[in-house]
């Protein structure tokens, strides 16, 4: 059997793993053993599995494999943020970011190579859509990041306490594989991450939001970015299919359906200078979100070459923040992390574009040396 035909056990949830062993004529409990070996002990070969008999290990190595994405590049920011560029098994590359914050460590995971939604302010969108990632490639980012921190002694010590599906891609457009990966994240035999600590972020795919509320208990973030349809159609093209009135109704349904007490939906709002950051936008937003249990997360826009947008002025962000808070909307401003390694929200583009970016910088440094210095100074302020 060739490698390509082997089943990659990394991407199987507990029920799928049980089915795999039953089909092999083996006992169901093997699934638990193997899951632990893969996700707790970070094993990448059957040889390491000392409590599995030699005959079964041999049989497994003939039909199955444990294969994660390869680390092509790793960078560590001044603020401790780590970014990996992963070369995928099925071709292409994606980026994954780890953001430490006190006792919390959040891993920002990608779900697609590129993205078809094409939001006007997002560099992943500008890259276009290449393909969906497999469940092994999605959970493989958690597995590899976890391996980068060294062997796990017990779950409590694990540096990855939270996962956000906020890397490259629209997770709702790769629903089945994202769901499988999130099941493994939640499973005690996987990563044992609680439902409040796993967040799926969507640009607003209504049917899948309804589906998710039936399938798995996790937290939801919605990329809102505009308080009216005219502006949102421009910024988030998916709005033309699923406009705001319907989206708000879907958010209400989602929070009503969620069984746990923590049913608040996070509304993400990127702050684009003179585009969506005026007092009138804040007023419209308060009206729009009335009656839905939300918290608002303002994200200062992270620039990338040829973006065509600028980050809002600090004073405008503060004013916007204050207006929302004063009018009953719990609001926070996201601090930009890892921007010295291009790891901030919306800057993730994979290796191909990274190269473009490097050549862009190189060109700038040759032709616009003084201009670049000015830009750097402006960004550091
Ligand atoms: N596709 C999903 C999840 C990935 S994007 C979604 O859109 O929700 C994660 C968050 O970063 C989204 O809210 C997205 O709109 C935001 N984002 C994208 N580009 C950005 C940029 N250049 N600056 C700041 N935030 C950005
Ligand atoms: Fe895709 Fe999200 Fe970027 Fe929009 S913001 S293009 S949905 S990754």
Image: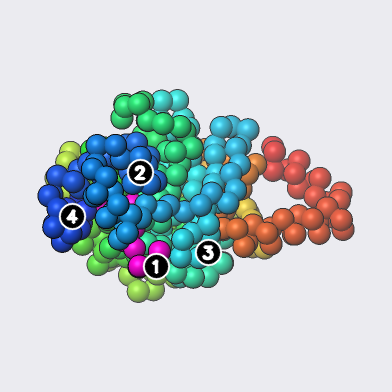
Residue 199 in picture, x, y percent from top left:
33, 47
According to the picture, the residue beneath numbered tag 2 turns out to be 47
| Foreground disc of the pair 2, 4 | 2
| Foreground disc of the pair 3, 4 | 4
- As measured in the structure, the alpha-carbon distance from the residue carrying label 3 to the one carrying label 4 is 31 Å
In this view of the protein, which residue sits in the foreground, 372 or 326? 372
- As measured in the structure, the alpha-carbon distance from the residue carrying label 2 to the one carrying label 1 is 19 Å
First in sequence: mark 3 or mark 2?
Answer: 2
Residue 261 in picture, x, y percent from top left:
18, 38
Q: Is residue 155 above or below residue 219?
A: above
Looking at the image, residue 161 sits to the left or right of residue 35; the answer is right
According to the picture, the residue beneath numbered tag 3 turns out to be 92
- As measured in the structure, the alpha-carbon distance from the residue carrying label 1 to the one carrying label 3 is 21 Å
Residue 186 in picture, x, y percent from top left:
25, 43
First in sequence: mark 1 or mark 4?
Answer: 1
Q: Residues within 10 Å of mark 3 (few under 14, many from 20)?
A: some
- As measured in the structure, the alpha-carbon distance from the residue carrying label 3 to the one carrying label 2 is 29 Å
Residue 268 in view, yes or no: no
Residue 4 in picture, x, y percent from top left:
40, 67
Q: Are marks 3 and 2 in contact (CB under 8 Å)?
A: no
- Mark sitting on residue 21: 4
């Amino acid at each position: 059997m060739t490698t390509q035909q082997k089943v990659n056990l990394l991407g199987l949830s507990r029920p799928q793993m049980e089915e795999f062993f039953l089909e092999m004529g083996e006992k169901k409990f093997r699934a638990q053993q193997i899951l632990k070996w893969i996700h707790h002990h970070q094993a990448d070969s059957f040889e390491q599995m000392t409590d599995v008999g030699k005959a079964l290990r041999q049989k497994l190595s003939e039909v199955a494999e444990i294969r994660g994405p390869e680390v092509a590049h790793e960078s560590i920011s001044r603020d401790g943020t780590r970014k990996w560029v992963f070369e995928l098994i099925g071709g292409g590359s994606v980026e994954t970011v780890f953001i430490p914050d006190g006792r919390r460590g959040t891993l920002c995971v990608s779900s697609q190579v590129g993205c078809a939604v094409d939001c006007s302010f997002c560099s992943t969108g500008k890259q276009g859509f290449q393909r969906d990632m497999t469940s092994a490639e999605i959970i493989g980012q958690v597995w590899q990041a976890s391996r980068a921190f060294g062997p796990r002694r017990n779950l409590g010590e694990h540096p990855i306490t939270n996962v956000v599906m906020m890397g490259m891609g629209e997770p709702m457009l790769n629903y089945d594989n994202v769901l499988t990966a999130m099941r493994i994240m939640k499973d005690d035999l996987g990563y044992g991450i609680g439902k409040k600590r796993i967040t799926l972020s969507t640009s607003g795919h209504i049917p899948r939001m309804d589906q998710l509320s039936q399938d798995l208990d996790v937290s939801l973030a919605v990329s809102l970015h505009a308080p009216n349809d005219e502006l949102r159609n421009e910024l988030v093209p998916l709005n033309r299919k699923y406009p705001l009135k319907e989206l708000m109704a879907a958010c209400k349904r989602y929070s009503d359906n969620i069984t746990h007490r923590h049913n608040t939906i996070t509304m993400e709002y990127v702050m684009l200078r003179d585009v969506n950051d005026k007092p009138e936008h804040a007023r419209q937003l308060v009206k729009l979100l009335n009656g839905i249990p939300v918290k608002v997360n303002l994200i200062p826009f992270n620039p990338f070459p040829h973006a065509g947008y600028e980050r809002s002025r600090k004073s405008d962000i503060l004013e916007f923040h204050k207006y929302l808070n004063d009018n009953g909307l719990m609001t926070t401003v996201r601090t930009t992390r890892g921007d010295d390694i291009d790891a901030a929200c919306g800057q993730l583009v994979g290796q191909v574009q990274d190269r473009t970016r490097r050549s862009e910088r190189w060109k700038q440094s040759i032709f616009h040396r003084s201009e670049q210095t000015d830009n750097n100074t402006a960004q550091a302020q």
